[in-house]
Amino acid sequence: MGLETYFRKRNFSRTPEPKGKVLQTKRHRFVVQEHHASHLHFDFRLEIGGVLKSWSIPKGPSLDPGEKRLAVTTEDHPIAYLDFEGRIAEGNYGAGDVRVWDIGEFEPAVGEDPEKAYNAGKLNFTLQGEKLRGEFHLIRTGRDRQWLLIKSRDEFAEPGWKLETILPAAGKLSLPRARKKSSSPTKKAANASKQTRDKPIAAATAFEAKTLSGDLKLKIKSSTLALTNLDKVYWPEDGYTKGDLIRYYYDVTETILPYLKDRPLILKRYPNGIAKSFFYQHDVDQPPEFARTVTLDVEEGHKVDYLVGGSLETLLYTANLGAIEQHPWLSRARSLERPDWVVFDLDPGKDVRFETICKVAVSLRDLLAELGLDCHAKTSGSRGIHVYIPIKPDYSYEQTAEFAERVAARVVKQQPAIATIERSLKKRRRGQIYVDHMQNARGKSVAAPYSVRPKPGAMVSAPLTWREVEAAEITPQEFTIKSMPKRIRRRGDLFAAVLKSKQSLNKAMKELNEAG
Ligand code: MN
């Protein structure tokens, strides 16, 4: 036990936090600090063995015995940290505002040595704070660093109890964090929060907040859009929330919308994040008033109302439904039977190096160039590459599908060792890349450019330059919801040609037909 980790994580010339030292006292103090870092959480600390044993509680403690709160151990803090409040500046570990939410003494259970109990993973104690009173239990669950904080059913228990933050939680208040600083004391701010909670907030104002949490009503033009459960964790390994997903789409709106505009959308919904189950939704029963839909006959007598993409409201609405990916059709509402791009999905098998996928993509590009066609590449946002040929909406899905199949077969002929059109996984050789041309059918789709993918790291489908593909100098993992907005600012929309170019397939089809 010691403070090595605490010291290592901090630069004391840059953080207002106390340096402190290990200090044996006879006291048992506790503190709960409200910490508005990249994610609002509550730090629970108990004075044990000369330091503050610490847990991060995402939802904060509760007086409701029915609410078991996840508490994750963090590094020991010095006792001097007990009454620390302030703002940890940007760029430092734990940047954001810290407030003492509750402070007081704790009394270990009769006959319990807190240090031994901590090591054994089960602490029983009574809290004597302003807000937290009565008996609590902290129990290690056996999983990595995870404990549960549970209130006993005693006279201090309050079923249905709701935690109130001292500083307004971003996302629940119309005031952006930057402005909040100059406005006076917390009490006033808390009142403002109550008054404005149900009032829609202009999107531009809402997204100024550092973190999006709770529920939020957005005003976009004349529409109101309800965003819910924004602090639900969607990427458990990375800690990214639904709010982070929605913020990404908000940040890249102008760039992604042209790829969704006028296209029916297939919703692939992950309501509980990427580690839990998903389902497809084509039919929207009760679309919000701002939504544009198109009704399609899919089978005899069976109609489906598809959402049509192209507006900020619809984009954020689908993200709020847990549609992590954006899946537009290959054709637009005004010419539904005529796709305006052809797509190849280069899908690697196991143990394929990204370099090899790049090699197949370059072969495909060269082959299309021989046929007089330009094409454009992007990472799939997973391990593969998508190649798009922008075309005039003059051909049926049957025609483009047949064309894509012939092109794929030709690539495989040129690169038989590394490329295949064998659909059966079993029949594919190890290390081969599947040149998937099957998405060129009505009602199918691949993840759009700039679409987020439900993969660890919150990877994004990233348009690439052909130079990047040829050099194979990038990795798909480097494009994420964090890095992509910066790349767009630096490089612009590398896929823009797909929107502008309208190529005819006539000559290429003729050549492929003649070659047989
Ligand atoms: Mn913290």
Image: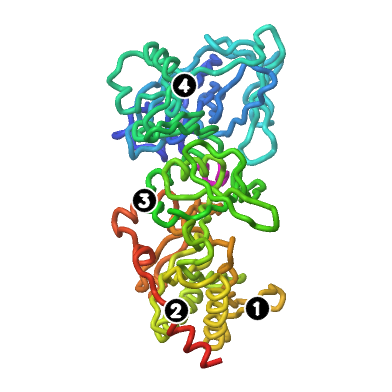
Mark closest to the chain's N terminus, 1 or 3: 1
Image quadrant occupied by the C terminus: bottom right
Residue labelled with disc 4: 198
Residue depicted at x 64% and y 77%: 430
Residue labelled with disc 1: 422
The answer to whether any part of residue 292 appears in the image is: yes
Marks 2 and 3, how far apart in space?
34 Å
Circle 3: residue type: Pro
Q: Quadrant of residue 501?
A: bottom left
Circle 2: residue type: Leu
Marks 3 and 4, how far apart in space?
30 Å
Residue labelled with disc 2: 505
Q: Is residue 66 left or right of residue 338?
A: right
Mark closest to the chain's N terminus, 1 or 2: 1
Q: Are marks 4 and 1 in contact (CB under 8 Å)?
A: no
Q: Position of residue 215 (x, y in %)?
A: 50, 29
Q: Is residue 113 magenta?
A: no
Circle 1: residue type: Glu
Residue 361 higher or lower than 338, as above or below: below
Q: Position of residue 90 (x, y in %)?
A: 33, 36
Residue depicted at x 43% and y 85%: 507
The secondary element bearing badge 3 is classed as helix
How crowded is the residue under tag 3: few (<14 C-alpha within 10 Å), some, or many (20+)?
A: some
Q: Residue furthest top?
A: 155
Circle 4: residue type: Asp
